[in-house]
């Protein structure tokens, strides 16, 4: 029994010892990874540099964000930003300057223009082609320019400065105020800058001209006065065109008002004519209807008279109808006629008594 307990205690100690060794190994491995590893943060790319042995130099392809193993004294990783870089070049006293000064551009007629620009650039992650333009990668950037961000910025600034002096410097003093000419020269400067920087793995996305002033104040004042005169001429021309347009509107309005009045009068006359024709048609129809009614009544009277004249009781009916009239007669009006002799009355009235 004692031997069994001793055996269990021995095995338990061995297990604990093994677990302790494993835990220690994990800790040591983690420490080694932490010491010899390098983490590339988001928005950045890494360029591995082999300092000795095979593969000496910079890796052509950039490393993606995440953990990467680094061996001391054998390799190291340099960080290069992947995001768009903004470099502002403008005169002293303004916030956010990179160089602390604006660019000085001499014009074709020997005037000096202070130009404030913003340069938008980025770095390629590997060599390749951008359209028809072949470019390098981050290894070319570090090998040709250096590993310092300040050296990258200075290289970009010098390239842009040279190109702007070449392109904008071809303009005369007054042509700086012509947007189409100025923008055309900026496009040439952008293309020339990218041709120079492409081999170093750099691409300039845009060169933005924010402000420009002439160092000679008299030039600024003279150009301002000239532009003011041009704008006043444009204003006078616009005012003249507006007055002409208003006069034309008033003329058209008067013509349309006259046409409207004419149409109203014509409409009223046409309405009167239509009403007259309607009244005439109505009266004609009424007269025709009255004639038909009169004819119908006459026909009825004729038929009734004919019927009475041919019937046996016609005399009696006539006598009865004439009785009120005869009864109202007074002596001296009708003589030699018996008021109650119906036969004589019928003959007197032109009728033919029934036999």
Image (cartoon, rainbow, N blue to C red):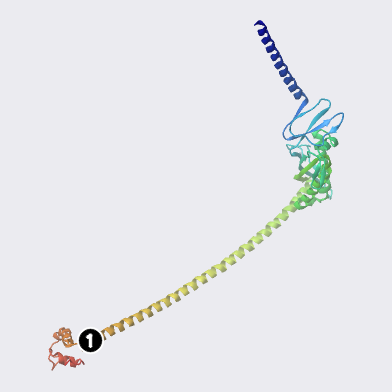
Residue 43 against residue 228 in the figure, above or below: above
Lateral position of residue 147 relative to residue 329, left or right: right
Lateral position of residue 111 relative to residue 319, left or right: right
Percent x, y of residue 74:
84, 27
Answer with the quarter of the image where residue 23 lies.
Answer: top right
Which residue is disc 1 drawn over? 307
Answer with the quarter of the image where residue 24 lies.
Answer: top right
Residue 198 against residue 15 in the figure, above or below: below
Nearer the observer, 222 or 243: 243
Residue 51 against residue 259 in the figure, above or below: above
Q: Residue at x 63, y 63 (%)?
A: 245
Q: Name the image quarter holding the C terminus.
A: bottom left
Q: Residue at x 59, y 65 (%)?
A: 250
Percent x, y of residue 276:
42, 77
For the residue carrying disc 1, how many other residues have a C-alpha within 10 Å: few (<14), some (14-19), or many (20+)? few
Nearer the observer, 130 or 81: 130
Q: Name the image quarter holding the N terminus.
A: top right
Q: Is residue 333 visible?
A: no
Lateral position of residue 28 relative to residue 318, left or right: right
């Amino acid at each position: 029994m004692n031997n069994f307990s001793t055996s269990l205690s021995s095995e338990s100690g061995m297990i604990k010892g093994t677990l302790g060794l494993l835990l220690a190994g994990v800790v040591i491995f983690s420490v080694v990874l932490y010491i010899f590893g390098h983490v590339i943060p988001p928005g950045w790319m890494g360029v591995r540099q082999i300092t000795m042995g095979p593969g000496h130099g910079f890796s052509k392809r950039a490393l993606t964000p995440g953990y990467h193993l680094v061996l001391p004294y054998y390799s190291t990783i340099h960080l290069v930003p992947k995001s768009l870089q903004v470099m502002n070049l403008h005169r002293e006293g303004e916030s956010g300057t990179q160089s602390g000064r604006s660019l000085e551009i001499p014009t074709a007629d020997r005037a000096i223009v202070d130009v404030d620009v913003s340069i938008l650039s980025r770095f390629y992650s590997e060599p390749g082609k951008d359209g028809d333009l072949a470019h390098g990668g981050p290894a070319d950037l570090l090998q040709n320019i250096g590993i310092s961000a300040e050296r990258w910025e200075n290289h970009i600034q010098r390239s842009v400065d040279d190109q702007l002096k070449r392109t904008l410097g071809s303009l005369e003093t007054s042509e700086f105020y012509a947007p189409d000419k100025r923008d055309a020269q900026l496009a040439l400067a952008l293309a020339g800058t990218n041709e120079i920087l492409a081999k170093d793995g750099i691409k300039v996305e845009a060169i933005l001209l924010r402000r420009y002033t002439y160092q000679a104040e008299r030039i600024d004042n003279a150009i301002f006065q000239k532009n003011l005169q041009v704008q006043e001429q444009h204003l006078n021309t616009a005012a003249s065109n507006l007055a002409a347009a208003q006069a034309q509107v008033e003329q058209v309005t008067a013509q349309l008002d006259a046409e409207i009045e004419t149409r109203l009068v014509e409409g009223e006359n046409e309405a009167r004519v239509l009403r007259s024709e309607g009244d005439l048609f109505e009266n004609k129809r009424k007269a025709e209807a009255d004639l038909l009614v009169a004819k119908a009544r006459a026909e009825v009277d004729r038929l009734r008279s004919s019927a009475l004249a041919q019937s046996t009781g016609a005399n009696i009916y006539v006598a009865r109808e004439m009785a009120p009239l005869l009864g109202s007669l007074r002596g001296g009006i009708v003589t030699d006629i018996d008021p109650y002799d119906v036969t004589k009355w019928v003959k007197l009235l032109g009728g033919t008594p029934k036999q």
